[in-house]
Amino acid sequence: MSPKRQIHEPGHRRKFLVIVDETPECDRAVYYASRRAARTGSGLVMLGILELAEVRQQWLGVADLMRAEATEAMQERLDHFSARARQISGVAAEHAIREGPQDEALLAQIAEDRDIAVLVLAAGTDTEGPGPLVGLLAGPASARFPVPVTIVPGALSDEDLDALA
């Protein structure tokens, strides 16, 4: 059981959490979460997850360099989507970068930041399925997940999302 959310306590407010990655649908999740955060007076957290399994197999100096390069690339991606969120809705996003398997990093972020109240994901539009996190959270794990999950259809336009957010 995860700790109680504290969004209604003095000095706290609800936050939407978005996973920032290289998928095309990531922009849809950022767009929707930005609009919802602005319309509800909420915050926005963007989480970048580094899955660096191959780093553990490298020599220490090489591993450090690989980790630094991956972190820098993720920070650039977070900066890009933060600028997009500000452009879309005027919301300034918080950034977090975690290393490890996606599900573990995601749960750790939610456990650490008890103001996170909603996870926003976007479903992929290709024929390979909705994406790994959507697939994970649509299965048995969803019953034990600590916050509600909003899944945004990846094919929705900005105008469609404006009407829904």
Image (cartoon, rainbow, N blue to C red):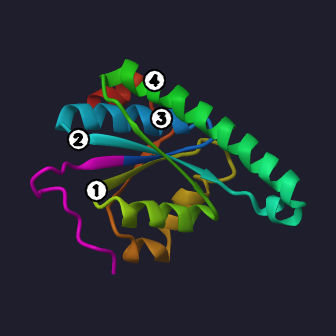
Viewer-side label of 3, 1: 1
Image quadrant holding the C terminus, namely: top left
Q: CA distance from mark 2 to mark 1?
A: 10 Å
Number of numbered markers? 4
In the image, the segment drawn in magenta is 1-16
Residue that badge 2 annotates: 42
Q: Amino acid at mark 4?
A: Arg
Look at the picture and state if 5 lies above or below 155.
Answer: below
Q: CA distance from mark 2 to mark 4?
A: 17 Å
Q: Position of residue 1 (x, y in %)?
A: 33, 81
Kindly identify which numbered label has been placed on residue 28. 3
Q: Position of residue 4 (x, y in %)?
A: 23, 71
Magenta stretch, main secondary structure, is loop
Of the image marks 4 and 1, the number of the one nearer the N terminus: 4
Q: Amino acid at mark 2?
A: Ser
Apparent side of residue 161 relative to residue 163 in the rendered image (left or right): right
Kindly identify which numbered label has been placed on residue 84. 4
